[in-house]
Image (cartoon, grey):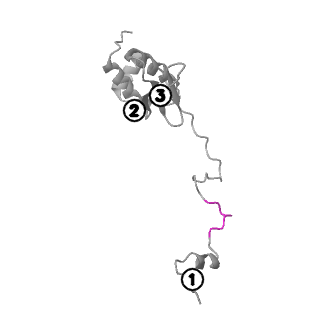
């Protein structure tokens, strides 16, 4: 594989992360391997003191470990991934809902919760001043 370590090549590899909806950041820190991956936030942090070759190598090393559907990439990106010989892990499929049970949306209120106000609470919330005799 003939691959040149240039700023243009770095931009192309950063484009792969952009299409995968990952944010690439260059920060200082104590990275044993030169980078850190925050999977749940989809952020890749690379040591900002690495030169172009080091940044490219770090980003290429991370690529196979991120969980992404390869079908989201453009044709040009797929060619670059093929040239780099990178295979992605497919993200895990969510478990199917069992029959008769529907998954409640996040933040949904259960039926047992009483959200109605009592008459006393409704009068206390008014902004009327107290009457002084």
Circles 2 and 3 in contact, beta carbons < 8 Å: no
Crowdedness near tag 2: few (<14), some (14–19) or many (≥20) residues, C-alpha within 10 Å: some
Of 102 and 116, nearer the camera is 116
Residue matched to label 2: 19
Crowdedness near tag 1: few (<14), some (14–19) or many (≥20) residues, C-alpha within 10 Å: few
Numbered mark located on residue 116 in the image: none
Residue drawn 45% across and 19% down?
60
Circles 1 and 3 in contact, beta carbons < 8 Å: no
Q: Position of residue 8 (x, y in %)?
A: 31, 20
Sequence order check: which comes first, mark 2 or mark 3? 2
Residue matched to label 3: 45
Q: Position of residue 100 (x, y in %)?
A: 65, 53
Residue matched to label 1: 130
- Is 114 contained in the magenta span? yes
Q: Position of residue 115 (x, y in %)?
A: 62, 68
Q: What segment carries the magenta color?
A: 109-115
Of 80 and 97, nearer the camera is 80
Residue drawn 36% across and 9% down?
2
Residue drawn 39% across and 9% down?
1
- Is 70 contained in the magenta span? no
Q: Secondary structure at mark 2?
A: helix
């Amino acid at each position: 594989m003939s691959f040149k370590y240039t700023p243009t090549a770095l931009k192309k590899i950063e484009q792969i992360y952009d299409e995968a909806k990952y944010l690439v950041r260059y920060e200082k820190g104590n990275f044993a391997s030169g980078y850190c991956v925050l999977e749940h936030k989809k952020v890749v942090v690379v040591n900002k003191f690495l030169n172009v070759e080091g940044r490219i190598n770090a980003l290429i090393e991370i690529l196979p470990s991120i969980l992404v559907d390869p079908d989201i990439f453009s044709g040009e990106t797929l060619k670059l991934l093929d040239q780099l010989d990178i295979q992605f892990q497919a993200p895990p499929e969510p478990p199917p809902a069992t029959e008769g049970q529907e998954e409640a949306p996040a933040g949904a209120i259960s039926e047992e919760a009483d959200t109605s106000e009592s008459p006393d609470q409704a009068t206390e919330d008014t902004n009327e001043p107290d009457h002084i005799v």
